[in-house]
Image: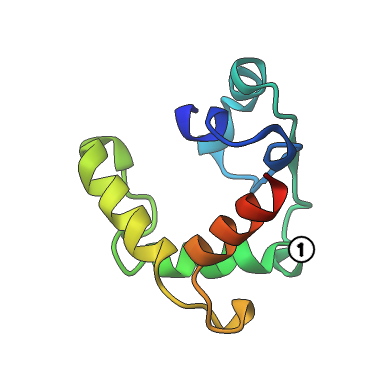
Amino acid sequence: METVQALPSHQKRLLTWDQGTEMGWHREFTVATDVPVYFWDPASPWQRGSSENTNGLLRQYFPKSSDLAVHCREHLDALAAALNNRPRKTLDWKTPAERLAKLLATAS
């Protein structure tokens, strides 16, 4: 939640989550961050292409149904940094980190 709270207000208008059981705390998240949460339609992967791609990238590190609670914050942060600095075809071979930095710079 700290990561979301650190974003500028225009970057946290809403969050869309998958239907997984791990998302059962979405109400608490919304209360803590003031970010409304919406859900994709079940069995509609075409509605969440970037999410499905990211899930595939994460499965290179964690098998499906892995318990991320057994990993320390530093390990998870290092993995997030690695993925956020990995060029993506859908971003014209820019990295998510580059795109976010550019977006935040133009909003300032």
Question: Is residue 49 placed above or below 101 in the rendered structure?
Answer: below
Give percent across and percent down for residue 3.
48, 35
Image position of 80 (left or right of 55): left
Residue ID for mark 1: 47
Question: Is residue 35 placed above or below 96 in the rendered structure?
Answer: above
Query: 105 or 5: which is nearer to us?
Result: 105
- Color style of the picture: rainbow
Is residue 17 among the parts visible in the rendering? yes
Quarter of the image holding residue 92? bottom right
Give percent across and percent down for residue 45.
69, 66
Residue at figure coordinates x 46%, y 77% from the top left = 87
Residue at figure coordinates x 67%, y 69% from the top left = 49
Image position of 23 (left or right of 69): right
Question: Is residue 13 placed above or below 64 in the rendered structure?
Answer: above
Residue at figure coordinates x 53%, y 31% from the top left = 6
Give percent across and percent down for residue 42.
74, 53
Image quadrant occupied by the C terminus: top right
Say what amino acid the circle numbered 1 marks. Answer: Gln
Label 1: element kind: helix
Question: Is residue 75 placed above or below 12 in the rendered structure?
Answer: below
Residue at figure coordinates x 66%, y 21% from the top left = 27
Image position of 74 (left or right of 5): left
Is residue 71 among the parts visible in the rendering? no
Query: 75 or 102: which is nearer to us?
Result: 102
